[in-house]
Image: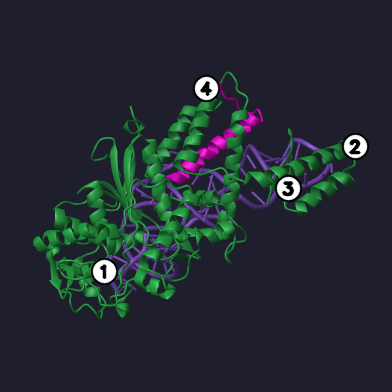
Amino acid sequence: MNLYQSQNLKIQNSLSGKKENFTSINEGHIGMYVCGPTVYSNVHLGNCRTFMSFDMIFRYFKHLGYKVRYVRNITDAGHLVDDAEEGEDKIAKKARLEKLEPMEVVQRYTVDFHNVLQKFNFLPPSIEPTATGHIIEQIEIIKDIIEKGFAYEKNGSVYFDVVKFNKTNEYGKLSGRKLEDMIANTRTLTAQDEKKNSQDFALWKKAEPQHIMRWPSPWGDGFPGWHLECTAMSTKYLGETFDIHGGGMDLKFPHHECEIAQAEASNGVSPVNFWMHANMLTLNGKKMAKSTGNSLLPEEIFSGNNTILSKAFSPSVVRFFMMQAHYTSILDLSNDALLASEKGFNRLLDALAFLPKLDTDTASSFDVKAWKQKCYDAMNDDFNSPILIAQLFDAVKYINLIKEQKETITAEDKTLVENTMYTFVFDVLGLQVKNESQNDEGKLSGVVELLIQLRKQARDNKDFATSDKIRDELMALGIQLKDGKDGTTFSVA
RNA sequence: GGCAUCGUGGCCGAGUGGCUAGGCACAGCUCUGCAAAAGCUUGUACAGCGGUUCGAAUCCGCUCGAUGCCUCCA
């Protein structure tokens, strides 16, 4: 029996606005699609939060015993920048500025993206398809939508007829918008002469002569519209209707709304059972976005090379910080919050490291089985990682009290606590024990151990002047000695 | 302007019609030669005003404030 059969998982569905019991379309299997990054610059921390939320979700599904096909695309075809730069997409623009081929830009930032995700300990998705690798599929969908009467061609471009679609379907059901309101409130744009209606969106865009990224199509040379790639790739790899579609909150409208329209127009069925949206990471109370410059790169946090934070933070600390908030809540990044997370995370790791050394007893003074289920209950309630972490700290307290001999644990329960802690901390939350480079650390610890011995001799001889000198001078070098019952340890700041 | 979300103790951040979230900081205690570190213990908060209710921080209304989307964006 698989775990998922005994755990009652609920998921907040953006489509209904409610928390719903989760069942997959095919027993034991889950198809999940998450909108990936546009690779025209370095991935920033805000992007990472969304992917991290879904990484945690992916990990929990796997832990529950589901076979998951997790598809996360790479958008490498670029989108239009704005009307002032009609016909030139983001990737082509950047390429010109940097004197690079568009695919060179794509390659550079795809590599950067993967590097960052690896540092954050992300599991790779099952399939990571690219938009440019699925031009044929996208063209086929456009042809299909035109055939079904929901799109029209104009001057080499193809547009989706939202007004017509809305007569038989409901455009705006995901974002809670009404088409009439949208039309009434649209700002007048300059270059929408080709569109029948302001809310129509491009499925295919004619390429101007200087446009580098271009493909032949039945409507002439051009490139696919903004929303089509996700429909093409999700349908290809997960089917016409699949279990979960995720992405950032900011993609809800228009991107995901358009995806629904395209899929329904083409396949006649609603594409997704559960729409999940991860909320924004803010910096100084504002959304992080590359376009406004209000952003932090992961590398800047790991290195401490930035003007916002007082020190460097490891990927696991950042990950722990993010996991302390629910994925549907806005999370504000600050130095104080990261410092607090770092301390808390270290306390968790310390307890975890001590766990195997605990003495066991004939009885447990703590209901370990009930605690374990509480951990599952937290995750089953729409992946509530902050509650899970609160439960983990309950175990930390318990472990520490056993250490102080104020609580007891049986050998069997100890194993259960160990397994459960490891499962949730490492497998589900994806946290890692800080990995210090072995070579230099080895030498350093040899030297410090020697000084610790000398200090102990001095202390035994009540030569506190010498012992304090060793302690204080090391502290000044950023090496802190920690006196415990079982001797002295140290940590490097 | 339209749509939506949110406003929780010093800070971060869960939750929710009656029952201690948790982390960090602060304080007290234990430990210590003194410290530091570590551990334990404690803290009673839910923007404002009105309403519903036996009971609301939680539901409803209004006000104020913040944010997101409406244009590429995780």
Q: Chain of mark 1?
A: A
Marks 4 and 2, Cα distance to the nearest angstrom? 45 Å
The 10 Å Cα crowd at callout 1, few under 14, some 14 to 19, many 20 or more, is: some
Look at label 3 and name its amino acid: Gln
Give a yes or no on whether discs 4 and 3 share a subunit.
yes
Chain B appears in which tint? purple
The chain assigned the colour green in the figure is A
Residue A214 numbered tag: 1
Residue A461 numbered tag: 2
Which quarter of the rendered picture does the N terminus of chain A lie within? top left
Q: Chain of mark 4?
A: A
Q: Earlier in the sequence, mark 1 or mark 3?
A: 1
The 10 Å Cα crowd at callout 4, few under 14, some 14 to 19, many 20 or more, is: some
Marks 2 and 3, Cα distance to the nearest angstrom? 22 Å
Q: Secondary structure at mark 1?
A: loop
Magenta-highlighted residues: A384-412
The 10 Å Cα crowd at callout 2, few under 14, some 14 to 19, many 20 or more, is: few
Res. A91 visible in picture: yes
Q: Which residue bears the numbered disc 3?
A: A480
Residue A470, given in percent of the width and then of the height, sits at 82, 47
Judge by depth and name the residue closer to the eye, A493 or A232: A232
Give a yes or no on whether discs 2 and 3 share a subunit.
yes
Residue A412 numbered tag: 4
Look at label 2 and name its amino acid: Asn
Q: Chain of mark 3?
A: A
Give a yes or no on whether discs 4 and 2 share a subunit.
yes
Residue placed at 52% from the left, 38% from the top? A392
Q: Earlier in the sequence, mark 4 or mark 3?
A: 4
